[in-house]
Amino acid sequence: MDVVKRGKGELFTSPDPDVAREFFRAKNKALVAKVMTVQEAVRRFVHDGDYLAIGGFGANRIPTAVCHEIVRQKRRGMGFLGHTSTHDFQILAAGEVFDRCDVAYVVGLEARGLSPNARRYMESGKVRVTENSNYGLSLRLKAAAMGLPFLPARHLMGTDTFEKSPASIVTCPYTARKLVLQPAVYPDVAAIHVHEADVFGNCRIRGIHISDLDLARASRRLIITCERLVHSDEIRSDPTRTLIPYYLVDAVCEVRYGGYPGCMAHEYFSDEEHLRKWLEVERDPEAFAAFLQANIYGVSDFWEYLERNGGMRKLTRLRRMELRIRAREEDHGQA
């Protein structure tokens, strides 16, 4: 194919599927129990310098406990896939975990506003940035999940985003029209929060999953956190509901309310009060340092963080809110 133009964005990972396949070929795919704590999973599978990706969408179904633990264990020099990243990005920026980032949606917490600290960090000059669109990063994960070095699309041409992306414009050998090629991205490690998993890593997700199924297949190492561990007989009783199979998974961590303070479809609503607190306290770096000490560095695990911010009383209220919303939606759908 004739390359018409190349974006100037830096490639932070190799798009070569054969390089990735060498790793996947050696990966243990045995049906063995993988249950462990979040602390152990991060210690074993998340390393300084790795390229990291986080599942979920916006504030929905974020593996918050893993993000906290990565910061608590003071990982540094990582790359980050900023796909649809809100509170997870806010947490990782607070710990200055990454120094290079593929950016589609970061810094913002959607309608809640921008993270002052994440913005300071991205403007500090400490982070190398390559831009893209949400769709572009989805294509990059899709290409990796398919074992391809790239996927073609008809987007970004004529935009500044293309200029700052790692994509290329080529001439199609069949139609002679121009196409954009998005290079595959194979993360070293990813974390995804799901509704249910068995001890082997077979996972179920309710609601939207955006690119998480491709992310699971594209990533060399995968940490799963789940709301509930279920028996493998339950998984086998309805295999069509298994969206992430066990052989992709390296660690399974049961973390009830593991997406807090974000939301979890059919489980609990987001804690908007606590998310506002994050945004407010970030305006003052000294106050934010004390907030991080109280909520991440100064707690032993995610459960202690939950207890410090309302515990089961608040979590039960958030669960009632979500279930009421779902009930109203069902009533509306039947009307």
Image (spheres, helix red, strand yellow):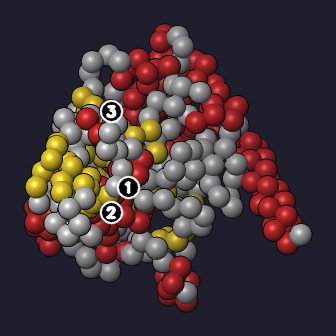
For marks 2 and 3 on the same chain, the one whose residue lies earlier in the sequence: 2
Please, what secondary structure does the residue beneath circle 2 have?
Answer: helix
Across and down, in percent, residue 278 comes to 58, 26
Crowd band around label 2 with a 10 angstrom C-alpha radius: few (<14), some (14–19), many (20+) = many
Dot 3 corresponds to which residue?
160
**Which disc is residue 142 wearing?**
2
Dot 1 corresponds to which residue?
138
Across and down, in percent, residue 146 comes to 27, 70
Q: Are marks 2 and 1 in contact (CB under 8 Å)?
A: yes
Picture layout, residue 1 above or below residue 274: below
- Residue at (51% x, 61% y) in the render: 209
Q: Where is the C terminus found, in terms of image quarters?
A: bottom right
Across and down, in percent, residue 31 comes to 32, 80
Mark 1 is on which residue type?
Ser
Q: Residue furthest right?
A: 335
Mark 2 is on which residue type?
Lys
> Alpha carbon of mark 2 to alpha carbon of mark 1: how far?
6 Å
For marks 1 and 3 on the same chain, the one whose residue lies earlier in the sequence: 1
Q: Nearer the viewer, mark 2 or mark 3?
A: 3
Q: Quadrant of residue 18?
A: bottom left
Picture layout, residue 12 above or below residue 57: above
Q: In which quarter of the image is residue 264?
A: bottom right
Across and down, in percent, residue 242 comes to 48, 77
Please, what secondary structure does the residue beneath circle 1 have?
Answer: helix
- Residue at (63% x, 49% y) in the render: 263
Q: Quadrant of residue 313?
A: top right
- Residue at (78% x, 47% y) in the render: 317
Mark 3 is on which residue type?
Asp
Confirm whether residue 175 shows in the render.
Answer: yes
